[in-house]
Amino acid sequence: MSAIGGVVEGFNFSCGMPVRVADLNYGGHVGNAKLLDYFQEARVAYLHYLGGYSELDIGGVGLILPEAHVVYRAEMFLGDELLVGVRAAEVKKSSFRLEYRIERDGVVTAEGYTALVAFDYTRRKPTRLPEAVGRELSGSRA
């Protein structure tokens, strides 16, 4: 998979993201809760790149996010141009994990992951990932 805006080593998809005024907290740096917003933006771009998918339609099913983990490694400031890497991991029958790394000028500023579960929004229940989606996710691992 090619990257957008640069490459995060070990990740097969990357997208650029600027730090905005709304991302800052009282300390003048990116607030830790904003990292989940960065992960979401990168996840949406990754799913679209992978197969034109969205969180509401990944091969005919939706996704829910029951777990997120974030590690803040270095401050990020207004005007910083960040690069967010995304890769699939732990692809199972009804779930998978996406791992993220945020860098600024080659320095890791944050890392984390989200667990995603295939979800049938009509039945309001978890469901299996479509086989083709599972193969695409497995094939996209770095």
Image (tube, rainbow, N blue to C red):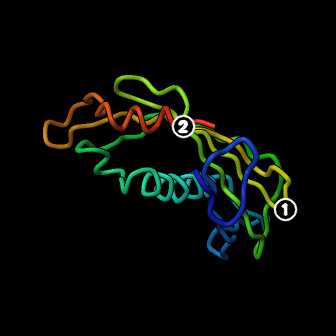
* Residue at the spot of label 1: 105
Helix, strand or loop status at disc 1: loop
Residue at the left extreme of this rendering: 123
Residue type highlighted by circle 1 = Asp
Helix, strand or loop status at disc 2: strand
Between 111 and 139, the residue placed more toward the observer is 139
| In-image side of 76 versus 12 (left or right) | right
- Position of residue 107 measured from the top left corner of the image (x, y, whole percent): 85, 53
Q: Residue at x 28, y 34 (%)?
A: 130
Residue type highlighted by circle 2 = Ala
- Vertical placement of residue 20 versus 68, above or below: below
Marker count (numbered): 2
| In-image side of 82 versus 142 (left or right) | right
| In-image side of 16 versus 136 (left or right) | right
Q: Residue at x 77, y 55 (%)?
A: 103
Between 44 and 110, the residue placed more toward the observer is 44
- Position of residue 99 measured from the top left corner of the image (x, y, whole percent): 60, 39
Q: Residue at x 67, y 76 (%)?
A: 21
**Which mark sits nearer the N-terminus, 2 or 1?**
2
* Residue at the spot of label 2: 88
- Vertical placement of residue 43 versus 25, above or below: above
